[in-house]
Amino acid sequence: MAAMVSLQSSMTALSLSSSSFLGQRLQPSTIFAAPVTSKEKPCLIVMKLKRWERKECKPNSLPVLHKMHVKVGDTVKVIAGRDKGKIGEITKIFKHNSKVTVKEINLKTKHVKSREEEEQGQIIKVEAPIHSSNVMLYSKEKDVASRVGHKTLENGKRVRYLIKTGEIIDSTDNWKKLKEEKSKTEVATTA
């Protein structure tokens, strides 16, 4: 009780003047020193990307790369869209927007202008990308589309396999064959 009385007497002894800062608002001029003026004029034109051109980015400004259940060289079956039911091989993968291009599937017509006066314009069929969720891995041996699973072999190697058939997709023979075909096409295009 004595401590309480001494505390109250010390509080009343403390007198606050009107010039003290306790209980009063700070003026904005006291917070900021001087307004900073930039010599550069602000850019009036702001370029806005279209919704389909935007890429989701990480904090370090690199695009987010999505995990894909398919790889280049896999045989897939289209399960949705205009080309539903068609079977083809994956030729290219776009990880930033989860799309794949499949050989001879989702063909679009492209009108190409002539580059020289003698050359004529052309109408070309081009493979357009499909979202990876619209394709499913396909077994040529058993003629069935299946989801992909992952398992570890006895030697410690992690491989992908088809859940319905148990067929292993990632084998060394498949990758060697794929690399040989790729090198042949590169030689053919350079020659």
Image (cartoon, rainbow, N blue to C red):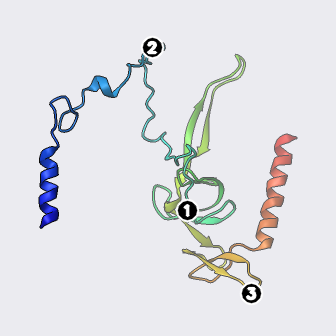
Q: Name the residue under label 3.
A: 154
Judged by depth in the image, the label closer to the viewer, 3 or 1, is 3
Q: With 43 as the anchor, is 164 left or right in this view?
A: right
Q: Do the residues labelled 3 and 2 touch (CB within 8 Å)?
A: no
Query: Residue drawn at (50%, 57%), measured in percent from left and top?
Result: 83
Vertical relation: 7 (above or below) 56:
below
Quadrant in which the N terminus is drawn:
bottom left
Residue 174: image quadrant is bottom right
Vertical relation: 180 (above or below) 13:
below
Q: Position of residue 19 (x, y in %)?
A: 19, 28
In this orientation, which residue lies closer to the viewer: 156 or 2? 2
Q: Mark 1 points at which residue?
A: 86
Q: Position of residue 69 (x, y in %)?
A: 58, 66
- For the residue labelled by badge 3, is the local secondary structure a helix, a strand or a loop? loop
Query: Residue drawn at (68%, 74%), measured in percent from left and top?
Result: 169
CA gap, disc 1 and disc 2: 56 Å
Judged by depth in the image, the label closer to the viewer, 1 or 2, is 2
CA gap, disc 3 and disc 1: 35 Å
**Res. 41 mark:** 2
Q: Are marks 3 and 1 in contact (CB under 8 Å)?
A: no
Vertical relation: 37 (above or below) 18:
above
Q: What residue type is labelled 1?
A: Lys
In this orientation, which residue lies closer to the viewer: 159 or 117? 159
